[in-house]
Amino acid sequence: MGRPRVSIVVLNWNGWEDTIECLESLFQINYPNFNVILVDNASEDDSLEKIRNYCSGHLPVKSSFFNYNSHNKPITVYEYYDTFKKDKKPLKNENLTNKHITLIKNSENRGFPGGNNVGIKFALEFFDPDYILLLNNDTVVDENFLGELIKNGDSRDDVGILGPKIYFYDEPQTIWSAGCKISWKLSRGIQIGTNETDNGQYDEIKEVEYVSGSAFLIKTETIKRIGLMDEDYFLYFEESDWTLRANQEGFKSLYVPTSHIWHKVSRSGGGISNPIGLYYITRNRWIFMRKWAKKSDYWYFIFYQILGALIFPLGLSIYYKNWSLFSAYCRGLKEGLNS
């Protein structure tokens, strides 16, 4: 029996330097049965040209995590539009090698869930994978990371979603996420173990509330039961929502500490230090809580939001010396209340 097929969906938006480092690490893993679907979310820079140059072998990648391998180039690129109109016909599954990329060019920026959904739909239509991995373009992976995830996924029928131990890219021994949990009263996603040096304290495989969307492995059977990600979120909270929908169908999430990746945290959205990130975090908290929170947690959340409606954005604006954060928070709050 062969190893399960995995489709890896990587989303790019004006981030070709991160993307090609991520791709190079992927093409050096030791898992034998995967394909890469790279979705470009209507980048406004020269990402497409740079990615093509990388695949042809004309743009080497420098990284402290691996040595560049010129021997696995060129990597064949099959290009599509988001309507799946074929520019180049894909090979049949049985003839595919790991030395190819499917590049889908979105006509507009569909956000994180929308962009990934395009890749997921393509994978389900053309590749018939057993698993789909959503992988942030600002990550670098260990050569064993995928095999460890698949091994643990195959060992438990009740598990639908799995995630690795994630380290900070700039501090390779410091944990960013050892699984995640939800602070329901504050509507915050909490990365377990964040900022802790890895001394083996999170080396136990365990069930968690959810895993980070930066490396999110989901079984195809789970997707077929729960559907695609909710595109209304656009950025942030979408993986938590998706996980809770999986929970409703009886699927659990598993943190796998023997699988390792490194993450350049908040390169695309920027988190609360960036107006785009702050807007969507503020807006989506209301959407998420209204949909999923218990009544008692929801009322506590409302109280906390009222209390912090002025203090929180004012403090952020002063701390980051960026007054556009204040208006971004207010817009997010208004649209969250009206959603």
Image (cartoon, rainbow, N blue to C red):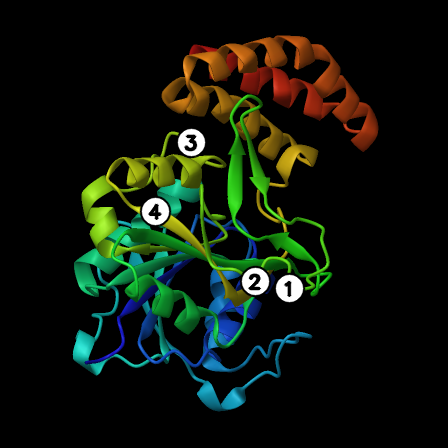
Q: Closer to us: mark 4 or mark 3?
A: 4
Task: From the image, tell me which residue sits under label 1.
Answer: 200
Residue at 23% across, 39% down: 249
Q: Residue 35 versus residue 186: which sits nearer the camera?
A: 186
Q: Residues within 10 Å of mark 1 (few under 14, many from 20)?
A: few
The answer to whether the residues at label 1 and label 2 have Cβ atoms under 8 Å apart is yes
Residue, far bottom: 71
Cα–Cα gap, marks 1 and 2: 5 Å
Q: Name the residue under label 3.
A: 233
Per the model, the C-alpha gap separating discs 1 and 4 is: 24 Å
| Image vertical order of residue 221 relative to residue 50, above or below | above
Image quadrant where residue 305 sits = top right
Tag of residue 203:
2
Assess disc 3: are there few (<14), some (14-19) or many (≥20) residues with their C-alpha within 10 Å of its C-alpha.
Answer: many
Which SS class for mark 2? loop
Q: Which of marks 3 and 2 is nearer the N terminus?
A: 2
Distance from disc 1 to disc 3, alpha carbons, whole Å, reads 35 Å
Q: Picture quarter containing residue 39?
A: bottom left
SS for callout 4: strand
Q: Decide which of tag 4 and tag 3 comes sooner along the chain.
A: 3
